[in-house]
Amino acid sequence: MRWEQLAKRQPVVAKMLQSGLEKGRISHAYLFEGQRGTGKKAASLLLAKRLFCLSPIGVSPCLECRNCRRIDSGNHPDVRVISPDGGSIKKEQIEWLQQEFSKTAVESDKKMYIVEHADQMTTSAANSLLKFLEEPHPGTVAVLLTEQYHRLLGTIVSRCQVLSFRPLPPAELAQGLVEEHVPLPLALLAAHLTNSFEEALALAKDSWFAEARTLVLQWYEMLGKPELQLLFFIHDRLFPHFLESHQLDLGLDLLLYLYRDLLHIQAGQMDGVLYRDQLDRLQRWALACPQRRILAGMEAILQAKTRLNTTNMSTALLVEQLVLQLKR
Ligand SMILES: [Zn+2]
């Protein structure tokens, strides 16, 4: 990762780190907090490379020298990365780090350590690290990474400069899901339903979600069928799948995005289409439906969502009313 890339994803973080480098005021301990996939580890390695680079250019590391390359491959003797060992970071791991860091730096006067998933430290590991943070060796930089910073000891947090990594915009979140082998159509939808990488990944990998998406496409198609057939579909197919109200809420979101896709298609904004693999079908539907009906449909879905979340109305009645509105 380069600064330009970090600045695009995390403008505030990039600015803070760059300004620290420019002014020669690098903190002795940082806490990078934010959801998975937001670039915390990459940012910590970028900082490491700049600090150890043999021919830096301004705030940027060269990315080509021996040190830059060794940091990339995890082989620099003065840059250590600690990760959970079998579910937690143990006291011995922190003690090993302390021992390593009590020796003079192998190759320069600087040392850096990065603790991944710092919230997974055992209590005794956290207490050891705290002592380490309280008596910083000159030239040592610590970077703790966490997705759950409320789980860290307050005394640790207060000794670090905290940099918050913002959640990813949906397009980048979807890209991250694709890298985890989620098919693009599911990734796009999941990334719009939540901005948590973990939640989106769990949703996208759940077969319930893929089935829900298929049913919602059928749902729209059925709106063009005779009323009895439509009601039969709802009771026979939809309800068993969207049994719980949070499931129905999600189903309504999926339907809402389908309507939004039709608007995007009418406006020629193909980049915004989420049901991208269904383009042929969607184009036919967009052609057959006037824009005011799409807008009225979205309004009706939003109202149904509100009613679902604020009243005790039966979900069956709610959906029946909604489909009759959408059918009109
Ligand atoms: Zn370099």
Image (cartoon, rainbow, N blue to C red):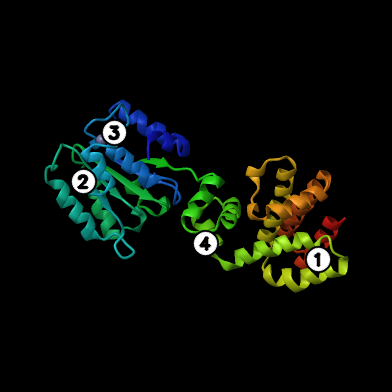
The percent coordinates of residue 8 (x first, y second) are 47, 36
Q: Amino acid at mark 1?
A: Leu
Q: CA distance from mark 2 to mark 1?
A: 64 Å
Which residue is denoted by mark 1 in the rendering? Answer: 317
In the picture, the quarter occupied by the N terminus is top left
Spatial CA distance of label 4 from label 1 is 30 Å
Lateral position of residue 283 relative to residue 193, left or right? right
Mark 3 belongs to which amino acid? Cys
Name the mark nearer the viewer: 4 or 2.
2
**Badge 3 element:** loop
Residue to which mark 3 is pinned: 62
Earlier along the polypeptide chain: callout 4 or callout 2?
2
Residue under the point 77% across and 49% down? 286
On screen, residue 36 versus residue 121, left or right, reads right
Residue 18 picture location, percent across and down = 36, 31
> Which disc number belongs to residue 76?
2
> Residue at point 61% right, 64% down?
210
